[in-house]
Amino acid sequence: MRFKRPMKSGRFLGLAGLGASGGESNAMILPRLLISTASPCSTQVRTAPKSCRSYLNVAVFKYNKNVTLGRRMSRLVTMGTASRGALRRFRFCLAWETRSWNTRVLLIMQNDPSVESREWRPDSWQRKPAAQQPVYPDAAALQAVLKQLARLPPLVTSWEVESLKNQLAEAARGERFLLQGGDCSESFEDCEAGVIAAQLKILLQMSLVLMHGGRKRVIRVGRFAGQYAKPRSVDTETRNGVVLPAYRGDLINRPGFEAAERIPDPARLLRGYERAALTVNFIRALIDGGFADLHHPEYWELSFVGKSPLAAEYTRRVEAIGESLRFMETLTGSRIAEMNRVDFFTSHEGLHLLYEQAQTRQVPRRAGWYNLGTHFPWIGNRTRALDGAHVEYFRGIQNPLAVKIGGAITPDEVLALCEVLNPGNEPGRLTLIHRLGADQVAQALPPLVEAVQRRKYSVLWCCDPMHGNTELTPGGVKTRRFEKVLAELETSFRILGECGAHLGGVHFELTGENVTECLGGASGVTEADLARAYRTPVDPRLNYEQSLEMALRLAGLMSQPRPAAD
């Protein structure tokens, strides 16, 4: 609802902590509403989604400017720096003074008793129910490891994090495109030069294709340097009547089917940090050494690429980019130095909260807390509960973050996640990665996009066409069909355009290796081929040829004129 009389020429006075006031007895109580300002000169009260209604009670009333409140307002805080923790801890008075009529309007946001009153801290998530967390038999050993982790140097820097956030804001405006990809679950054993370089090569080649087709700069984000933990559908695994705890990724336990290997081992947290540090260091060394130089795309070629049916198309695009680059350098009379290197960012699912907490730091000359274990953490579909520990942890860090949203989610839940994780509606802060499945996306995606569009939330829409299209073969092998992955991608691209939004990124599980884990594509992988090179311990990945073909198909979509919104 809106106030009947607009507040013309309003002047924002501030946000103040307020004690008990005699004026409260005259208040018109509007229970469990959220407040938003439609513009500096008007105020709107809107009903909150059910999932958010436990946060605040609101009282709205008017009083004459000559009336005193009985207790002076104190603790002035600007809207830009007030945290949700502060809003929960105090009663706040949000006031405008109008010049056109002799009235003030106060919106009193009163703490709800069902909400914890303490401000956010890196460990405040421990007051919430935490899903998908391992149970360690030796609590003392775990605490010793966590203390050591907290003292180790960060893996990334706050200025890199802020740079990525700015680039994601540009992608949300349609000026860039996000390419995020890598292994389903990294392995400690695969922390070697050849594997890491192959990942970079396929992501660089895909980004080159997307730049050429979409005429946009590409943000390259790898699912690496920390993707060592995986959520599981069930807590146990059964083989031949033997039941053991599930393998949860190398960060937690080992994949071997022995009782001792499935026990969560805190020492593996240190091993994961070390492997992530080695990966980040090698990637930076490659990039600084010219590995990503657009003048030399031949550096990115993989040994088995020559036989690919896509080689000719890729080569044609590379040659076109090379011609354009040489033309620009001829015009300017100098080498374009910016083409010598590109930005690469790291990402992983922030699943193991004790590990993430240990790497959450404050930095000089910047406000707030940063997760310096990665640039771009995300919340998985299984751990996005609004009252859960993962949402509580993520809402307080300064990193750009993403949330995976699956088919069971409702528009109200999506809006509530936007409100909690990005209350300031900061561009580049929040990415919604939808993973709905080729059979469900046409029905499930439009209501979500329309709801976000109506509220004018600043989000980046990113499609994960992998997880909603997983299936088992008759022989019990987990796989994905290239045609279904592509179908979800194409449908998402169309729907977002029809809703007045745009697809701003893609999220793939892929590898630069010549594996046979997903069916179909130009390489023609069949069910019989799966046994030839099926190497993933968890979920199937696109191989090199399938990844490059997906990039070529997506580039074709991006080159088409954008449909007009209704």
Image: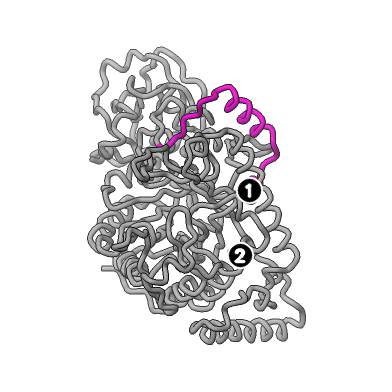
Q: Give the residue drawn at x 59%, y 40%.
A: 370
Residue 322 is marked as none
Amino acid under label 1?
Ala
Which residue corresponds to the image point at 35% horizontal and 41% vertical from the top-left? 234
- Residue 555, image x, y percentages: 46, 76
Quadrant containing the C terminus in the rendered view? bottom left
Provide residue 117's location: percent of width, then percent of height: 42, 21
- Which label was assigned to residue 200? 2
Reply above or below: 19 against 346. Answer: above
Amino acid type of the residue that numbered disc 2 sits on in the rendered structure: Leu
Horizontal side of residue 335 vs 477, given as left or right: right
Q: Which colour scheme is used?
A: one colour
Q: What stretch is highlighted in magenta?
A: 132-161
Label 1: element kind: helix
The image quadrant of residue 34 is top left
Of pointers 2 and 1, the one earlier in the residue sequence:
2
Q: Quadrant of residue 127?
A: top left
Residue to which mark 1 is pinned = 276
Q: Residue 270, how many percent across, how many down?
A: 63, 38
Q: Mark 2: give few (<14), some (14-19) or many (20+) Cα within 10 Å.
A: many
Any magenta on residue 263?
no
The image quadrant where one finds the N terminus is top left
Q: Which residue is drawn at 40% across and 64% down?
A: 503
- Residue 8 in view, yes or no: no
Asked if one can make out residue 324 in the rendered structure from this viewpoint, the answer is yes
Per the model, the C-alpha gap separating discs 2 and 1 is: 15 Å
